[in-house]
Image (spheres, rainbow, N blue to C red):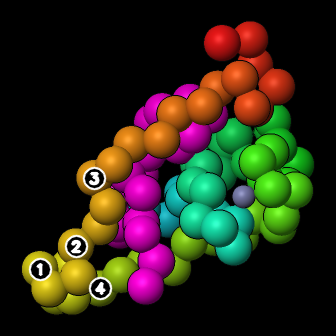
């Protein structure tokens, strides 16, 4: 099951489970679409994997299968000075 991390690793903006702005790699490194397109060129800075849009988890499923609340924020990996 996907972790559905709650924020972008690059800019720390919130990415709720119903956000169409979230992208992720196969290891669930999670970013917003803006960072993925402008900073990362759709390549994960952690694993060099492909970043694709994260699927939306239906709201009815979130009570039994909640999104992760563990924030990951690593701006130094995103070509930004931390
Ligand atoms: Zn971002
Ligand atoms: Zn990755």
- Above or below residue 69? Residue 26 is below
Q: Is residue 54 left or right of residue 40?
A: left
Residue 66 placed where, x, y %? 22, 73
Q: Which residue is mark 1?
A: 63
Q: Which residue is mark 3?
A: 69
Q: Is residue 37 left or right of residue 9?
A: right
Q: Is mark 4 within 8 Å of ligand 1?
A: no
Residue drawn at x 58%, y 55% is 30
Image marks 1 and 2: residues in contact by CB distance under 8 Å: yes
- Does the image show residue 37? no
Nearer the observer, disc 4 or disc 3?
3
- Secondary structure, magenta segment, majority class: loop
Magenta segment = 1-18
Image marks 2 and 3: residues in contact by CB distance under 8 Å: yes
Residue 59 lies in quadrant: bottom left
Quadrant where the C terminus sits is top right
Q: Which residue is mark 2?
A: 66
Q: CA distance from mark 1 to mark 2?
A: 6 Å
Describe the element under mark 2 as helix, strand or loop. loop
Describe the element under mark 4 as helix, strand or loop. loop
* Image disc number at residue 58: 4
Image marks 3 and 1: residues in contact by CB distance under 8 Å: no
Count of labels shown? 4
Question: Which of the pair 17/74 is nearer the observer?
Answer: 74
Residue 1 lies in quadrant: bottom left
**First in residue order: circle 4 vs circle 3:** 4
Residue drawn at x 32%, y 61% is 68
**First in residue order: circle 3 vs circle 1:** 1
Q: Residues within 10 Å of mark 2 (few under 14, many from 20)?
A: few
- Above or below residue 29? Residue 28 is below
Residue 51 placed where, x, y %? 75, 64
């Amino acid at each position: 099951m996907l972790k559905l991390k709650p924020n972008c690793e690059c800019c720390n903006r919130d990415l709720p489970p119903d956000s169409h702005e979230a992208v992720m790699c196969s290891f669930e490194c999670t970013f917003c679409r803006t960072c993925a397109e402008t900073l990362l060129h759709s390549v994960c800075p952690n694993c060099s994997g492909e970043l694709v849009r994260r699927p939306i988890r239906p709201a009815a499923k979130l009570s039994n299968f909640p999104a992760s609340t563990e924030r990951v924020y690593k701006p130094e990996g995103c070509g930004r000075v931390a």
